[in-house]
Amino acid sequence: MRLIRPLCALLAAGCVVSGFTPVYALSHVTAWAQSEVKAAAAAGLEPSSLADAHAVAPITRAEFCEVGLSLYKTMSGKTAQTVKKSPFSDTDSSAVATAHALGLVSGRGDGIFDPDGAITRQELCKLLDNVLVAANCTRPAADPETISDFSDRTRIASWATDAVERMLSAQVLRGISRTTSDGSGEAVSCVELQPTARTTREQALIIALRFTQSFERAAGSTASKPTTGATAVIPADPDGSISARPDSDTTTTVKPDVTAKPDADKPADSESVPTTLPRTQEEKMAFVFGSSGSFFQTPALAEAAMTEIAVPVWRLKDGKKTAGKAYLTVNRNLAAICTAIFIQIYNGDEKFPISDVGGYAWRPSATSEHRWGTAIDINYDANMEATIGADGSLTPTCGTHYTPGDDPFSIPENGDVYNAFTKYGFAWGGNAWRSKRDYMHFSYFGR
């Protein structure tokens, strides 16, 4: 295996030399991923079946078979002979049949392939490893040390262990950054493997591009090397959906107020909070959804963009406050900001107690920020949602009361909770609208 090339060559320079202006078919590609997705498309790694497909939705097993065939062609210099008859009862895809004939993929058993199922990270590694075999490329020995520092390494299936180790060693696969708290007011960033997690379409194309840049092509291959994108080296894979809460033994403690500004192409879901916070609606849209992104229209798209964070909170029981931890799901691009908010609340003079907190939840309303993972509710019963009558009276529609000063769980205006959220650009439902009050509610876009 040769040394891995840094992903820093300018795509524009490559286009000038070749006279080719690459385009990519995916829609709603997030800002940090655009350069490498363009480079993957220019390298012929993006199948036409992904035209207009949403970039942050999970890539399916059938879709990645097509990517795998493109990788086989790149690495071997040969086009696989198309197989039309599928060996599986649940798909007639020639791409799946061809990939199976090459030995790139296998089914779920009993003649089932599950073409629309999301491919897991370990399955993806196995397919990439099989490409090396099919293309007659040299495979370096798997190194168990590459996974030794990951706390979730035992979740890797035995059939995928060698492939995962090989892809980690080549930096084709990288760990997933996850920000949590150690319960003492310090933010803790850990990196996990998450072998059973799903991979988005844009992530899959970036990993495919890394693969072609990290392994030598087969002897005699006439395939040209792909043009790299204008990106910075990313220390960890962009975050996927996280449902587990494992503690990691690969942790780094960082201060609550993180001021390091991310590189232009670095995903926003790292442990860093931007030095200059987005303030306008346009800036916020680009920060959360990417420069060409839009609000999520389906639960699948939304869930693929969420992550779970663990934050320090104060609990109040029998008149005594104790340190605790709360878990909530938020948009992954707001994870660092939301973590910083709760750390600020935790470190505040009030030691404001939190009995319940919620973030992402798919709602029927197309304008609900909860379904975008950009809204957070705190202590709902003591911070009611209410309509405002003609005489100014409030009629609760959720929760029972709002009595700051009397109920310690009610959120006072200009208190620690209010100040922390508004500092980072959130609006408070207690004073954001004329038609109602929603004292529990903090929203990034003011809805």
Image: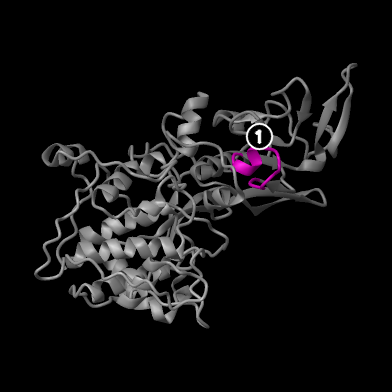
Which residue lies at the image location 45% right of the left edge and 54% below the top edge?
200
Q: Quadrant of residue 123?
A: bottom left
| Visible residue check, residue 245 | yes
Q: Say left or right for 215 vs 146.
A: left
Name the kind of residue labelled 1 in the image.
Thr
Which residue lies at the image location 60% right of the left edge and 47% below the top edge?
298
Q: Residue furthest left?
A: 220
Q: Quadrant of residue 208?
A: bottom left
Q: Say left or right for 257 vs 423.
A: left
Q: Where is residue 62 shown, x and y percent of the image?
A: 43, 64
Q: Tell me the residue that label 1 is attached to.
A: 367
Q: Is residue 254 magenta?
A: no
Q: Say left or right for 41 vs 306.
A: left
Q: Nearer the viewer, residue 199 or 20?
A: 20
For residue 285, above or below residue 210:
above
Q: Residues within 10 Å of mark 1 (few under 14, many from 20)?
A: few
Q: How is the image coloured?
A: one colour
| Visible residue check, residue 147 | no
Q: Nearer the viewer, residue 408 or 141?
A: 141
Q: Is residue 363 magenta?
A: yes
Quarter occupied by the C terminus: top right
Q: Where is residue 420 shown, x and y percent of the image?
A: 60, 33
Give the SS element for disc 1. Answer: loop
Q: Where is residue 229 shown, x and y percent of the image?
A: 24, 45
Which residue lies at the image location 73% right of the left edge and 48% below the top edge?
356
Number of labelled discs? 1
Q: Which residues are magenta?
A: 359-374
Q: Say left or right for 93 vs 68.
A: right
Q: Nearer the viewer, residue 81 or 335?
A: 81
Which residue lies at the image location 46% right of the left edge and 28% below the top edge?
283
